[in-house]
Amino acid sequence: MNNQERAVTKRRTQAGIRIKLICALVIFTALVLIAIWVLQIRLLSYFYEKEKFEELEDAYEEIYTRITDSDFKAQVQKTAEQHGVCVRVFQIIDGMAKEIGGAEVSASCMIHHLPTRLLSNLYQSAAENGGSYDKRMEFNQNFVEKDGEKFYLPGIHNPANAVSAICVRIFENGGNVYFALLDSELTPVSATINTLQVQFMWTACFLLVAALVFALILSRLIATPLSAITQKAAKLAAGNYEADFEASGYREVVELADALNFAAREIGATDHLQKELIANISHDLRTPLTMIKGYSEIMRDLPGENNAENAQIIIDETTRLSELVSDLLDLSKLQAGTIKPEYELFDLTQLAKDTLVRYDALVRHNGYRILFESEGEATVLADRGMILQVIYNLINNAVNYTGSSLRVRVAITLKDDRVRFSVADDGEGIEPEMIESIWDRYYRVDKVHNRAVIGTGLGLSIVKSILDAHGALYGVDSAVGVGSVFWFEMPVSKADN
């Protein structure tokens, strides 16, 4: 099984967005239902009793603040009625408890029917616990149960199997010790819990079904545009760069479609340039090879043709072929990043002057005029050999595309600690929409691949790769019918740095 088959098998075994979304929503709904079950049903009794004891504590705080009031008994009655609790308050005098206030607001009040022994036990429990004691007490058929021991309560009117919350507090105020008991009935919640459980089962079934239906609808809305984009992406992978990725509904899907449309255009353009590159390289390789073969056959077959002139043509074409192969290798290495600049300080102005010497023969024999202007020395920190290639290729490009004037202008200008090298020609100029493409390999503005007067046709691609490696600024200013100016800028370095 090859890698592609493994990838297809892996994709088929992976869960799709529909399945994952359905599972996620169902799991989330189940977690919510579990939380409701635990908090609203299983812990209902706990929260109910906790609230009752907090209510008793609030009533006690009010009693504590009113203990010295002249109308204390009336205040106790008022507090008991407001909170719905029964209250008894004792003052401890010489070890004896004297009741100084109370209120019985419920027929099921327990504390007003407790025997002395049980009151003493509650007081002792509170004393042992730092003056505070809370107890959940159950009674059945007039018997109250405390710590496993049953006590008979005469005259109580509670129904069977009732429960009360008892709050016992011992406190001091003004040098006196007081003993307060508060009682609140705990209504059985078992019937309520049973009702809630039945409601919960129906609610759970409804929510699970609703979550499943919602997940199906939502997954369809999300997955449908993605599936359509995936199908078109498969066409793109098969080489159909005309695929149009249209999408709507979600911003992310629309952005994905736009990105794929851009990628399709770029891949299509790259594919076109690649085919054009192969055709152009084939042309440039075939031409010198044809001439080398032709002149070699002439020198072999025709008497008197084995002369220095024909041999020089063969040498020139061999040199052109060697330069083309060398430029292709250099360009591939530069774009792959295998060639790194080796920085050194040198004078860019002097390097340009030395480069122009190479064009003396072209100026003498072909009528070209190469003008040079500079504003003085310009020391830069760069790879000297690479910058030499840049200067050489920019001048070659201007020579190949200048107009009938055969004029090329080379200039070095200084501004704000930066130096600009520029080469201007009087050619036909470049359309604005084509400027970004001129740095591509073998790109031709007129789309007709003509043999360069000098160079191999790869110069601008090499220039771009070298300047990118140096982090230099570069560009072209062009006007149709006027000509073009190619330039690059670098910071000026001090010789003593």
Image (spheres, grey):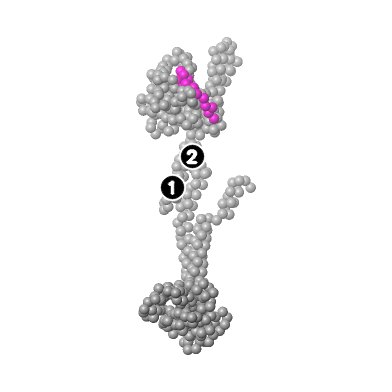
Q: On screen, 319 above or below 447?
A: above
**Helix, strand or loop under label 2:** helix
Nearer to us in this view, 325 or 349: 349
Residue beneath the point at 41% across and 32% down: 434
**Helix, strand or loop under label 1:** helix
Q: Nearer the viewer, mark 2 or mark 1?
A: 1
The answer, for residue 197, to whether it is visible in the render is: no
Residue 436: quadrant of the picture: top left
Q: On screen, 157 above or below 404?
A: below
Query: Is residue 433 a member of the stretch shown in magenta?
Result: no
Residue 273 pos. (x, y %): 48, 34
Nearer to us in this view, 320 or 340: 340
Residue beneath the point at 46% across and 58% down: 218
Hey, which residue is sitting farthest bottom in the picture?
Answer: 155
On the image, numbered disc 1 is attached to which residue? Answer: 255
What separation in Å lies between label 2 and label 1 (alpha carbons)?
18 Å
On the image, numbered disc 2 is attached to which residue? Answer: 267
Label count reads: 2
Residue 80 pos. (x, y %): 40, 79
Q: On screen, 262 above or below 277?
A: below
Determine which of the numbered discs, if any, sits on residue 239 in the image.
none
Please give left or right for residue 275 compared with residue 415 in the image: right
The answer, for residue 15, to whether it is visible in the render is: yes
Instruction: Give the amino acid at mark 1.
Output: Glu
Going from N to C along the chain, the mark reached first, 2 or 1, is: 1
Q: Which residues are magenta?
A: 340-353
Query: Is residue 343 a member of the stretch shown in magenta?
Result: yes
Residue beneath the point at 56% across and 51% down: 11
Residue beneath the point at 55% across and 28% down: 329
Nearer to us in this view, 305 or 468: 468
Residue 377 pos. (x, y %): 44, 20
